Amino acid sequence: MLEACVLATIFCGFFGIILKKNLMMKIISMDVMSTGVIAYYVLIASREGLFTPILGSVKKGAYADPVPQAVILTAIVIGFSIQSLMLVGAMKLARNNPTLETNEIEKSNTP
């Protein structure tokens, strides 16, 4: 059930990017999709019966791999930087255009 909710979050973000015409809504939809993908990887990585390699008191057993945690942390930082860069781009566009609708921006910038 939890997998279905996470996949629904990913699809909501994906369809928001495709269907929304407002640039701010596209940025928010991309952030929602990124959050869903990160949640999906965390959901896959958190399995029952795995122990942390540092805090686990078990000498022999199935240990959780710390590499996916590092990759997800990197994905969070990269996602934040991309989102801030897109917001700066939207601010630059808002100075020249009275609207953030993509149709109006394309009309005003075509030769």
Image (tube, grey):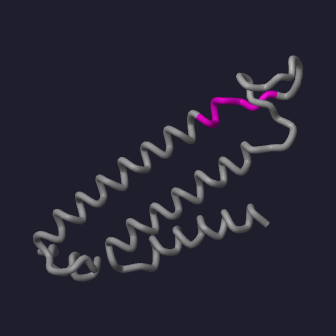
The quarter in which the N terminus is drawn is: bottom right
Residue 58 picture location, percent across and down: 86, 22
User: Which region shows up in magenta?
Assistant: 63-69
Residue lying at 71% horizontally and 22% vertically, measured from the top left:
54
Residue lying at 63% horizontally and 54% vertically, measured from the top left:
39
Residue lying at 52% horizontally and 68% vertically, measured from the top left:
13
The quarter in which the C terminus is drawn is: bottom left
Residue 93 picture location, percent across and down: 18, 67
Total count of labels: 0
Q: Is residue 72 magenta?
A: no
Residue 8 picture location, percent across and down: 65, 70
Residue 68 picture location, percent across and down: 64, 36
In which quadrant of the rendered view does residue 28 lie?
Answer: bottom left
Residue lying at 45% horizontally and 79% vertically, measured from the top left:
19
In which quadrant of the rendered view does residue 46 lie?
Answer: top right
- 52 sits left or right of 27 in the view: right
- 103 sits left or right of 94 in the view: right
In the foreground, 5 or 53: 53
Q: Is residue 66 magenta?
A: yes
In which quadrant of the rendered view does residue 84 lie?
Answer: bottom left
- 43 sits left or right of 90 in the view: right
Q: Give the answer, above or below, for where 73 lies relative to 33.
A: above
In the foreground, 35 or 23: 35
Q: Give the answer, above or below, for where 94 lies relative to 46.
A: below
